[in-house]
Amino acid sequence: MRRFWLLFSQTVTVGLAMWFIVASMKPDWIASGLHDRHVETAAVPIQQAAGPAVAQNTYRQAAHRAMPAVVNIFTTKEAKPSARHFDNDPLFRRFFGEGVPGQDEKQFSLGSGVVVSTEGYILTNNHVIEAADEIEVALADGRKATAKLIGTDPETDLAVIKINLTGLPAITLAQLENTQVGDVVLAIGNPFGVGQTVTMGIVSALGRNHLGINTFENFIQTDAAINPGNSGGALIDTDGHLLGINTAIYSRSGGSLGIGFAIPVSTVKTVMESIIKNGQVVRGWIGVEPQDITPELAAGFGLEKSSGTIIAGVLKGGPAEKAGIKPGDILLSVADKPVGDTISMLNLVAQLTPGETVRMTVLRKSKESIINVTVGKRPRIKQPAIQEGE
């Protein structure tokens, strides 16, 4: 027994000595032997999608349909010593882009536009291309072209330009009467020059006016993010149809605060067709300065209701003076359509055809009278003013 134990201890000692020598001289032999062994590990549970995602609650089709028709607009004009590149308004800020004069004494601005005809007509804001010496359009497919100015309408802040390219994608106009507050809308444009961008929101309000942005106002209000560079871009519905042209935001910092305004497609269509046909928008005019009826004025005139508008001034030699309208008269209706306030009066008169004679009802010294007025042509102005006299 003792002999057997002695043999066992000697064998173990020799084995350990050999392992030590191999570990010291050839460690890779031991590592190779360990790696050859199969070691089982626990599998990490990972779920992999079997196929493409099913489209749910997505507006990809609307965006895909409208995005090709929205273009980037780059304008260039000669810089002047007194020119301001971006005027910060504490209430409303228009989107001329970040105009930066280069070494060649030029100003560069950016904006957006919408292709409305396969013939190359593009809608944008007047302030995007105003006073531009050169207008370049970049399409979503990478093509670029120099644009020709067809006409502008500063009083609605709309303009029409044209490019000569074939195979243009034109957007489809929506029916505004089918739009209601709460409907989902998408805004498409080129904010800050980062590239074409789509943002989502809802229709916050319809028929916004008295904002002091344009002479003729009937804005769609939305909380879809609109930023500098989006001006002239498209506001679309969930079918990808054009609801309006993005034009302004309410902002104290220049960034989006969720209060944006778009010119509705009803106004856009009328202005566009007039510009393409006549090179400008022709509106009716009677030459008066209107003023809203406040509760105090209503009490002073002994009026039972505050609808209508007071004629604060009459242009000498204008259509209203020739027809017999006088300062202090209260205009109650135009062409048998009731006048609610100054805005409605401006819109009603603007829709009239210059040269036609229309019936207007006025209240003078508590007595209503019918006066026939031969409508004149509204003079063009360079800058819109909400209280500019009718």
Image (cartoon, grey):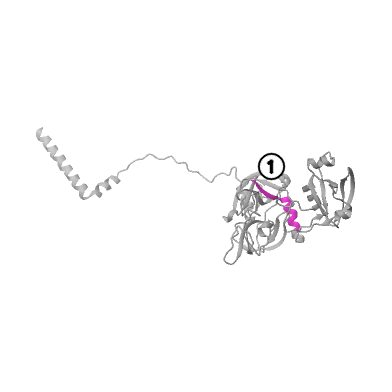
Q: Nearer the viewer, residue 96 or 277?
A: 96
Question: On the picture, is 195 further left or further right than 8?
Answer: right
Quarter location, residue 117 = bottom right
Q: Which residues are magenta?
A: 259-274
Q: Nearer the viewer, residue 275 or 129?
A: 129
Q: Is residue 81 left or right of residue 11?
A: right
Residue ranking furthest to the left: 3
Most foreground residue, 196 or 81: 81
Identify which residue is drawn at 36% across, 40% down: 41
Q: Is residue 3 above or below residue 105?
A: above
Is 197 magenta? The answer is no
The N terminus: image quadrant = top left
Total marks drawn?
Answer: 1
Q: Which residue is mark 1?
A: 181
Residue 241: % across, % down: 67, 50
- Secondary structure mostly seen in the magenta stretch: helix
The spot of residue 209 in percent (x, y) is 72, 47
The amino acid on which the numbered mark 1 sits, given as a three-letter code, is Val
- Residue shown at 69%/62% (left/top)? 149
Q: Quadrant of residue 56?
A: top right
